[in-house]
Image (cartoon, rainbow, N blue to C red):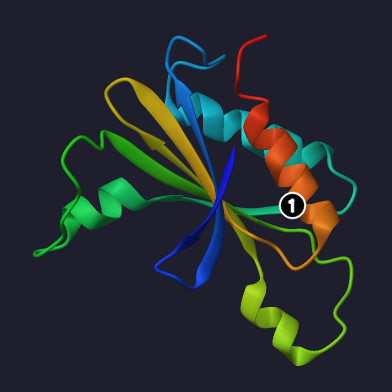
Amino acid sequence: MKQTMFQEKYPIYTLEVGKDECRFASVDEIVDYLKEKIGEHPAARFIAEFDHYAHTQSLPKGEVAEGIRAAKNVVFCFGIQLPNPQVMAVRPRSIGVVELAEHFVLTFLEAPVKAANDSMEAWARGVVAD
């Protein structure tokens, strides 16, 4: 799992998993697994599944990077507190799942709460075969 700054301002976590190392064979299987993990979490709530690949392909000037075969977001919220209006800017959470020829890439934006990051990191790492 790598922590980087995307576009020099967005702290993101990225996990690249070779298809030969992955417990799952497709983006859909990984998305289903993530939805299960969200459902098991006492504070998390599943919101939506967004097919970013299909959406972008459907646009008249939509562009998908060469090599991307599938790309979906799992949208959910931990939301155990609503301390101020500004927290809404960083909610809900999303984990992106992308398929390339030889591997899958899971990404998510750093959350302001460590426990949320810990959960998302554990869920992402859970796609790696034992």
Residue positioned 44% across, 9% down in the render: 20
Q: Which residue in the structure is indicated by mark 1?
A: 117
Q: In the rendering, at what x and y percent does residue 118 appear? A: 78, 46
Q: Amino acid at mark 1?
A: Asn
Is residue 24 placed above or below 87 in the rendered structure?
A: above
Name the image quarter holding the N terminus.
top right
> Which of the 4 image quadrants contains residue 113?
bottom right
Name the side, left or right, on which 2 lies relative to 99.
Answer: right
How dense is the environment of label 1, judged by Cα within 10 Å: few (below 14), some, or many (20 and up)?
A: some
Residue positioned 83% across, 37% down in the render: 40
Towards the viewer: 117 or 97: 117
Q: In the rendering, at what x and y percent does residue 65 appear? A: 19, 47
Is residue 89 placed above or below 74 in the rendered structure?
A: below
Is residue 83 placed above or below 7 in the rendered structure?
A: below
Name the side, left or right, on which 67 lies relative to 119.
Answer: left
Q: In the rendering, at what x and y percent does residue 114 appear? A: 82, 57
Q: Secondary structure at mark 1?
A: helix
Residue positioned 55% across, 56% down in the render: 12
Name the side, left or right, on which 22 lies relative to 81.
Answer: left
Residue positioned 66% across, 29% down in the render: 125
> Which of the 4 image quadrants contains residue 98?
top left
Name the image quarter holding the C terminus.
top right
**Furthest-bottom residue in this view:** 85
Q: How many tags in the picture?
A: 1
Q: In the rendering, at what x and y percent does residue 47 appear? A: 63, 56
